Structures are given as structure tokens and as C-alpha cells.
Amino acid sequence: MIQIAPSMLAADFLHLEKDVRMVNEHADLFHLDIMDGVFVPNLSYGFPIVEAIAKIATRPLDTHLMIVEPEKYVDRFIKAGSAMVSFHVNATKDPDAVLTQIRNGGARAGLVINPDLPVESLFPYLKNCDFVMLMSVFAGFGGQKFIEETYDRVRALKAEIIAQGLDIPIEVDGGVSASNAAALVQAGAEILVAGSAVFKAEDPSAVIAAMRG
């Protein structure tokens, strides 16, 4: 089943409750981008926003940590309401330990890579992941153009997941829209993150429906 995860970084923060309720009604997950200004050259939001969304969210919170040493913060993000927590494989010295920490905290654990890292960098950790995420743009900024090589990367990652006898979904984040959703799903993606494509549309619910195919 394909899941659509609108990225709340693109939401209207003056009317955040309205956008949260739209996701509750029409989408599957809340995608929350957490940036520290160190791992990526930008800042986003932190615990207060996650907690506020969690209060009225009826869909799971999918929290994507773009921060160094994520092990320092994962427990707090789980406590704030995150059901899924992912971090970048090169943001910590021991990815396996952080994956275990997330799972022990009661959340689903995921690993992320940027477009400049080979998909093979995820392979040693797949057995400890509940999901994996490929960035189809470089983490840190919204509104970037989708990188076409992502399709081949999804196919290669899907093949390795199958080869290892695993059944974990691939999430794709960055420049995803109704125009490329079907091709991503065909390549093997199961969770699609979309920010601007959803929240900048006149009818966000229609865009979500179109992405489902």
C-alpha cells in the first residue's frame, strides 16, 4: 500500500492546525524535517512544533533528523510523539546503535542517504531498519528539482532488500509530485514525501489523491 507523507515544512505555520487536519483526513503520515544548521546548512523547527502537531494528529509522525549525533535527541523526539524516526547514515559513528535506540524507544527506525552517497552504504544496516529513505534532492532545502537518477537508486535498493530476504518500505523525499509518483512506485518506493507539491497546491487533497494513482 502506497503511503503519502506531506512534509510539514511546507505547511502554513500561521494556520498549522488547518494543514494538520487536512493531513489527518487525506494523507497517511506527517513528515517532519528536523534541521540543525550543522549537518545541513539550514534550520527548521524543534520539539514544540512536533508536540503541537502530535496533539491533534491522527496519523503517525514520521520524523526525519538532519542533525549530527542524532543519538542525543531521538528519545526526546519519540517522547514528543514521533512514531517513525530516521537519521542520516553519515551523521553518527554507529548507525546500528542508533537504530536499536530508536526501536527500544518504541518507534520505527529508518536510515537516510543523500543523493551523493551510494545506495550500498545502506546495505550493512538494512536488517536493523524498519524503513529506509532515499533523498531525491539534497537534504536541507525545500523546492529543489527532483534528481532523475533516483529511479535507478530505488530499484537497486529494492533488489538488495529482496536479496536479504527483508520486507521494509523505501521512502523517497524531495521533489516528489503527482508527475513522478507512479514511476517511483513502479521502481519500488512505498512511502512518498511531498511538501510544496501538496501545500502549495490549490487543492492539496486532490494532489494527494493523484499521487496515490
Image: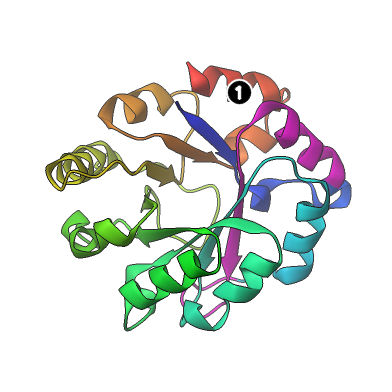
Given residues 66 and 106, the one toward you in this image is 106
Given residues 134 and 196, the one toward you in this image is 134
- Callout 1 secondary element: helix
Q: Describe residue 98's horizontal placement relative to residue 162 as left or right.
A: right
Residue name at image x 63 percent, y 33 percent: 198
Kind of residue sitting beneath label 1: Val
How crowded pointer 1 is (Cα within 10 Å; few <14, some 14-19, many 20+) is rated as many
Q: Is residue 87 above or below residue 176?
A: below
Q: Which residue is mark 1?
A: 207
Q: Is residue 63 above or below residue 68?
A: above
Image spot of residue 63 (x, y percent): 57, 58
Q: Is residue 34 magenta?
A: yes
Image spot of residue 212 (x, y percent): 50, 21
Residue name at image x 40 percent, y 27 percent: 180
Q: Is residue 45 above or below residue 212?
A: below
- Specify how the rendered protein is coloured: rainbow
Kindly tell me whether residue 49 is visible in this rendering: yes
Q: Quadrant of the N terminus?
A: top left
Image spot of residue 156 (x, y percent): 17, 43
Residue name at image x 85 percent, y 45 percent: 17
Q: Describe residue 186's horizontal placement relative to residue 50 as left or right.
A: left
Q: Which residues are magenta?
A: 17-42
Residue name at image x 65 percent, y 18 percent: 206
- How many marks the image carries: the answer is 1
Q: Is residue 29 magenta?
A: yes
Image spot of residue 102 (x, y percent): 49, 68
Kindly tell me whether residue 116 is visible in this rendering: no
Q: Describe residue 162's horizontal placement relative to residue 209 as left or right.
A: left
Query: Which of the 4 image quadrants contains residue 199?
Result: top right
